[in-house]
Amino acid sequence: MKFGFIIPHNFGLDSPKDVVDVAVSAEQSGFDSVWVNHHVLHAGYVLDRLDDKPYYDALTVLTYVAAKTNLVKLGTTVLVLPYLNPLVLAKTIATLDVMSGGRMIVGVGVGSLPEESAALGSDYATRGKFANESIEIMKELWTNPLPSYRGSYYEFSGVKFSPKPLQTPHPPILVGGQSLPAIRRAVVHGNGWHPIGLSPDALKTRLEVVNQLLDHHGKNSNGFRISLRSELKVTDTDADSNSATVAPPDKLINTIFEYERIGVSEMVFSVSTDDVPYIHSMIDKFSKEILPAFKK
């Protein structure tokens, strides 16, 4: 089991240093990866949470974190593809993969805020189709010496693309979302699935669909990555929570083993607060009380 930690760049922290220090602390405490969220505007639940407090740009933060860390993988949970030009995004990701020594994990999604989508000139109703094309374009640019593409949104030929990512054939692409179209997108276009907050029982049910689709498309489930995002809180006693990973150490360890048993290869944890000392305390607790059970 691999473990990731989500950087709180999306919780209105006034000090950029606090954001980066969390990433450094996670690496030093034994986490395998650090992750960033992505939104462009304060709308919907983001506006409710932050008002006018800062939400730092995902890939800019990740670039700075790459320079301040050494081995930890660098993930996105998730980039909202309909907000982004896929050719520009492919170059940014490839550059970051090369300059970080091959550490990128590309989590992608379609977005869930119609008001943000409209403000950015993206058609919310066709965002899935745009996302599929974006993934195809990025893979074409990353893997083909003479890339060409003809789709509904973009068309190009007679060009070259650089740099190619350091990871071959390209950084892993994990598709977020719980819906059937999202799961299908993960199977057809991605290297793994990145759901949020599912209990072991709920995840087990969804994985039956994943495996059926993998079989239908002739893909090997052994090479397909299940990366689960979940809220983390190491408590002293049993907690009343919707998250299976808000629990005392012994129960949390057992829950993670259950996730591993049903096919999860990576847990990506968030601590949803702007309380920086508390975030560091959770990293420390996880490192000392949970992680040793999985690093034997």
Image: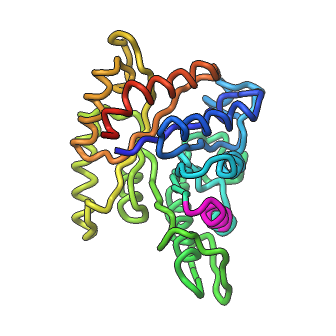
Front residue of 276/83: it is 276
As drawn, is 87 to the left or to the right of 172?
A: right
In this picture, is 48 found above or below 102?
A: above
- Read off the magenta span: 91-102
Front residue of 5/188: it is 5
- Residue 155 picture quarter: bottom right
| Magenta segment includes 93 | yes
**Which residue occupies 38% across, 24% down?**
289
Does the image show residue 179?
no
- Residue 249 picture quarter: top left
Q: How many marks?
A: 0
In this picture, is 113 found above or below 279?
A: below
Residue, far bottom = 158
**Which residue occupies 26% across, 47% down?**
263
Residue, far front = 296
Q: Position of residue 80 (x, y in %)?
A: 59, 50
Quarter placement of the N terminus? top left
| Magenta segment includes 104 | no
**Which residue occupies 39% across, 45% down?**
2
- Residue 26 picture quarter: top right
In this picture, is 20 found above or below 155?
A: above
Quarter placement of the C terminus? top left
Front residue of 85/219: it is 219
Q: Position of residue 118 (x, y in %)?
A: 68, 46
Q: How is the image coloured?
A: rainbow
SS assignment for the magenta stretch, majority: helix
Q: Position of residue 79 (x, y in %)?
A: 58, 51
